[in-house]
Image: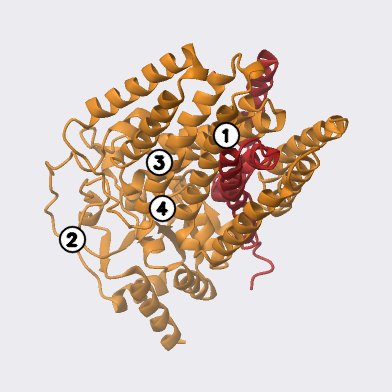
């Protein structure tokens, strides 16, 4: 199982390199905040930890994790959208 | 859990949507949609996870509500100039969340899942902790809560090395019998938290683009490591994508400064170099009125913005000046160096905010070859990225860094508060060149008065 996951990890890294080398430098800030939001995917683990209710302590850790990851995800996507909304053509200024 | 297959399919779909989203980010035309595609992927992944049988949704709801409100408020209210610190904070929170996930997983210590899991737990905790405290320090530096110059103390490198070795050593001991070493686990976490602080404090403000990229990469790798802890594909794939993205950006930034990553991280650049060479030629200064006449006669103008423009919030008046110059018949471009500002693409975002169409934003390789034909190059709060010493003087610490060669323009106007050297502490011979004119003052005030001159004239 672990080896299989490692395999997926390596392939995904390569895919990431391929996809991201094509992003032009003027979009680097949105790329960063957008990929930052994607790294908030750890929210999936946080939800499980908070919801499984194994012990009170893990519920606390999990809830905190859900909160932080949600800030990361929502904040990241909203701010990226806000930024990208500002990029515009010469044609339709203002 | 008979709905497990559906959840898995949702995860795969989410991962595919993330890939498409990033792919669409490669053009300004599709970028915004790409972000929405990626956000939809996230929604799908979260929605699917909530379907796991037997989850108690109460605390999840509390965490999501608090985080959602916090995230939306922060993202809506933040000023565009404060974007780098905002990204740093989000990064840190992502890292912290991964750390907490691994911790709670370890806390339960499912005996049947011990196998290789402790390695993943240790990796997540270390990367997550360094990401968290490192990002918080980066935030504090960028927001100038603490001095943004490199903070150095005696024996910094040996102390950091000792701390690193301690973390690795303790991790090794921990891995030998993970179940019985809770205290050691906490100690490793603590060491990593301290390490995150110590690794970022010696790095100065202008090197922040590199650090932000690197921390971005770490937050992805922490998420991927957490994926190994809870054996979840979507975490691994998305984390790897972000990790790769951060590594690429880090490499681009380092290349744009002609420095190795090790030099950025451990160089303490800017603080060590006290022995200044000093170019004590005379700098010719210029009044706003003279600058107006110069610009009024110019047929082609290139603006070179830097952190000074962001600090003075001058992007809107710069755009206004640019438009006035255009209606005066000049061709106007904005040339942006990859490391200008405090994060990759920082200047692009600011000028986009000020409504400058992205077609007018160009990169150094587009402008340098035609620099001789440019009438006026206006440098606004940039310094090291236009330092000709990087091209001409092998002894300069900046030597080899690709620059925007504004010194080759017919006239170069530098808007700057003083003759002080830039972040790197390296004097700039540009200021003393015969075709350079210094326009002293705050970027916003100076450019506003130029705009006023133009308006009076018409």
Of pointers 2 and 4, the one earlier in the residue sequence:
2
Q: What chain is colored orange?
A: B
Image x and y of residue B417, in percent = 25, 65
The residue where tag 3 is placed is B134
Q: Is residue B275 left or right of residue B48?
A: left
Q: Residues within 10 Å of mark 4 (few under 14, many from 20)?
A: many
In the displayed structure, B198 sits above or below A77; it is above
Q: How many marks?
A: 4
Q: Chain of mark 1?
A: B
* Badge 3 vs badge 2, beta-carbon distance below 8 Å: no
Of pointers 1 and 2, the one earlier in the residue sequence:
1
The alpha-carbon separation of the residues under discs 4 and 1 comes to 39 Å
Look at the image and tell me in which quarter the C terminus of chain A lies.
Answer: bottom right
Q: Is residue B62 left or right of residue B253?
A: right
Q: Are marks 4 and 1 on the same chain?
A: yes
The alpha-carbon separation of the residues under discs 3 and 1 comes to 22 Å
Q: Residues within 10 Å of mark 3 (few under 14, many from 20)?
A: many
Could you tell me which secondary element the residue under label 2 belongs to? Answer: loop
Label 2 vs label 4, nearer the camera: 4
Image x and y of residue B115, in percent = 61, 13
Q: What chain is colored red?
A: A
* Badge 2 vs badge 4, beta-carbon distance below 8 Å: no
Could you tell me which secondary element the residue under label 1 belongs to? Answer: helix
Could you tell me which secondary element the residue under label 3 belongs to? Answer: helix
The residue where tag 4 is placed is B341
Q: Chain of mark 4?
A: B
| Residue sitting nearer the eye, B285 or B52 | B52
């Amino acid at each position: 199982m672990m080896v299989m996951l490692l395999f997926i990890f390596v392939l995904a890294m390569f895919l990431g390199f391929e996809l991201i080398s094509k992003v032009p430098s003027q979009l680097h800030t949105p790329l960063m905040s957008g990929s930052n939001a994607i790294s908030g995917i750890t929210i999936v683990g946080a939800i499980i930890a908070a919801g499984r209710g194994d012990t009170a302590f893990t519920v606390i850790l999990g809830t905190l994790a859900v909160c932080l990851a949600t800030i990361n995800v929502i904040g990241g996507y909203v701010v990226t959208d806000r930024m990208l909304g500002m990029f515009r053509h010469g044609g339709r200024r203002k | 859990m008979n709905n497990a297959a559906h959840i898995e399919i949702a995860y795969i779909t989410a991962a595919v949507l993330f890939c498409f989203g990033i792919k669409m980010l490669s053009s300004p035309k599709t970028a915004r949609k790409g972000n929405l595609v990626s956000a939809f992927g996230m929604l799908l992944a979260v929605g699917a996870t909530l379907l796991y049988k037997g989850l108690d949704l109460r605390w999840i709801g509390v965490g999501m509500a608090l985080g959602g409100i916090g995230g939306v408020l922060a993202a809506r209210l933040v000023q565009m100039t404060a974007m780098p610190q905002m990204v740093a904070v989000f990064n840190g929170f992502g890292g912290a969340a991964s750390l907490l996930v691994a911790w709670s997983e370890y806390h339960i210590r499912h005996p049947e899942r011990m196998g290789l899991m402790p390695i993943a737990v240790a990796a997540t905790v270390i990367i997550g902790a360094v990401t968290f405290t490192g990002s918080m320090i980066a935030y504090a530096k960028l927001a100038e809560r603490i001095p943004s110059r490199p903070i150095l103390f005696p024996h910094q490198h040996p102390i950091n090395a000792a701390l690193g070795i301690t973390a690795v050593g303790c991790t090794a001991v921990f891995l030998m019998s993970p179940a019985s070493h809770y205290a050691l686990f906490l100690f490793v976490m603590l060491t990593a938290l301290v390490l995150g602080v110590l690794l970022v404090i010696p790095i100065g403000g202008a090197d922040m683009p590199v650090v932000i990229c690197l921390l971005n990469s770490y937050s992805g790798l922490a998420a991927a490591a957490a994926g190994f802890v809870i054996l979840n594909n979507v975490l691994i794939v998305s984390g790897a994508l972000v990790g790769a993205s951060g590594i690429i950006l880090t490499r681009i930034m380092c290349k744009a400064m002609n420095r190795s990553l090790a030099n950025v991280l451990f160089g303490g650049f800017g603080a060590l170099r006290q022995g200044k060479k000093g170019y004590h030629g005379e700098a010719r200064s210029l009044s706003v009125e003279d600058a107006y006449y110069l610009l009024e006669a110019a047929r082609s103008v290139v603006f070179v913005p830097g952190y000074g423009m962001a600090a003075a919030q001058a992007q809107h008046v710069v755009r206004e000046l640019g438009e006035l110059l255009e209606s005066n018949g000049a061709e106007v471009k904005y040339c942006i160096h990859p490391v200008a500002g405090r994060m990759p693409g920082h200047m692009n975002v600011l000028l986009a905010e000020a409504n400058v169409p992205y077609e007018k934003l160009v990169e150094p390789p587009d402008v340098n070859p035609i620099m001789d034909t440019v009438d006026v190059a206006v440098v606004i709060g940039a310094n090291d990225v236009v330092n000709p010493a990087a091209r001409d003087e092998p002894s300069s610490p900046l030597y080899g860094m690709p620059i925007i060669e504004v010194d080759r323009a017919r006239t170069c106007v530098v808007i700057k508060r003083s003759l002080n050297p830039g972040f790197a502490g390296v004097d700039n011979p540009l200021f003393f060149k015969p075709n350079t004119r210094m326009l002293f003052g705050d970027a916003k005030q100076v450019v506003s008065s130029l705009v006023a001159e133009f308006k009076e004239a018409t």
